[in-house]
Amino acid sequence: MRTSRKKIKTIIYKWLIVILMISFAAAAALGFFFQNLFSRRQAFTLLGEYIDDFQGDWDPNADLKIYVEEFLDDVVLSDPDTYRQNEKLKGLIDTNGEIVSELTVIDTDGVVVASSNPDIMGRNFFEDGTTSAFRCLFEGEDYYAMDYDPNPFAGDDAPELVYAGRPFFDGSGIILMGFNEDIRWIHITADLYDKVYNSRIGATGYLLVCHPNKTINGASYTSGIEEEGPFEKPELLPENDGEVKKTVTELYGKKSYVSALRQPDYYLVAVYPANEADDLKEKNNSIFVGLILLVFSSLFIVLIAFINNHIISQVKKIHGSLKKITDGDLDERANAGGSVEFYDLSGGINDTVEKLEDMIQQAKDQMAEELMNAKRIQESAVPQKFPENEAFGIYASMNTAESVGGDFYDFFMCGEDTLVFAIADVSGKGMPAALYMMRAKTLIRTYAMQGLPVEEVAAMTN
């Protein structure tokens, strides 16, 4: 049984270590969870910032409008009559088909007077709700372009066009340039290529630009991805304009964080390889584990010092005081402190010792009184007066080792000529021996008075 007992310090240290280890594991697991969550959020935040920066630096519509404006500058500075001929306009289309799909001249009344597209001859642009905004070119504006909406004049079989216009230098009308989405995308791609190619995310991340048909038209030099090929995972691309789709997936052979933005004219895809993002996460995790370990180690040391100073030391004080008390030192007093419980415990022990002292003193006083009474009885039981006789002389005295003892003597006359005397020592001391002595004395006297021989008196008394 004794080998299974443990000191309170050992028990407290053991459970403290267990609790701290469990707490450390829980804190580490929780920390890793939030660190991974934070790392994921950080990676997508980084991708979002690159997308926003790219969007902020590049406006494909603005760039295209500038291109159109520069093309029309050469026209409006020329002789307007030259361009009021359908054949002339068709010739320009044949020559510049890679940048323009349709050319149309409108007079000051808004009526089409010449066009490379005979289907719209005679139409009035000012009366149409969609194109009436071109009236501003007669009201001081030197350039106007429609938003990129379908061509309002296109028939079922005609290509969809968008228009940009400038007034002729002499104010005699305006010329409109129409171009379809394919031509527009060519201009967008040319500008995108330079902007995307020179971009990168971190050390190995990259940007991709995809055509609405989900083929790649531009890629960062860090990607190593060939252009004009299909995007590997079209399901990663969002369905709605302005929507951003975030995914963690395997892309082009690497697990990556992917953010894809859809715009009306293109997809912009930002890719950040997970190994680069996780490298930072692993460093952060190592730092986190180190900090947690340092905090818990410091906490363990502080708790051990606190327990030693405020619990173990007080328990040792109380234990030392109790050992002295149980060894018989009733002058010892417990003096533990540091908390209400230890003060109360010390006070309880001291109160118990004081009550024990009182009880012992009361017992001593009672015993002393009883022994004194027993001594008086014992002394009264032995002869105190010694007779004078011509035949003999006798005297006796008794001094016991304790207040009451088993030693005794007795003498008496048995008849007129026989003296009986007894000297005895009862084994033991104190009240039991005295009581035994009283009984023995009475028996000896009883049997001796019967005139029995000494040996019979002794035998019968025994």
Image (spheres, helix red, strand yellow):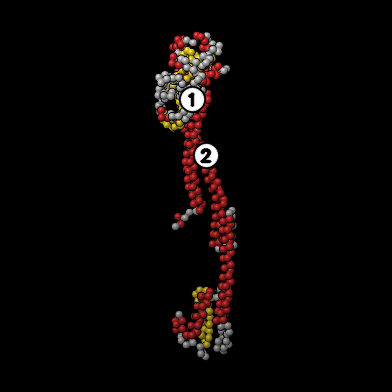
Give residue 248's position: percent from left, percent from top: 44, 32
- The amino acid sitting under disc 1 is Arg
Task: Say which of 213 and 250 sits in front.
Answer: 213
Give residue 399's position: percent from left, percent from top: 57, 76
Task: Say which of 210 and 400 sits in front.
Answer: 210
Q: Can residue 309 be seen?
A: yes
Picture disc at residue 291: 2
- The amino acid sitting under disc 2 is Leu
Give residue 362's position: percent from left, percent from top: 58, 70
- Please determine whether, in this image, residue 148 is positioned above or below residue 305: above
Q: Quadrant of the C terminus?
A: bottom left
Query: What residue appears at the point 50 percent right and 33 percent down from the top-left corner?
Result: 42
Query: What residue appears at the point 51 percent right and 88 percent down from the top-left corner?
Result: 414
> Going from the N terminus, do you reach mark 2 or mark 1 first?
1
Q: Can residue 286 be seen?
A: no
Give residue 337's position: percent from left, percent from top: 59, 55
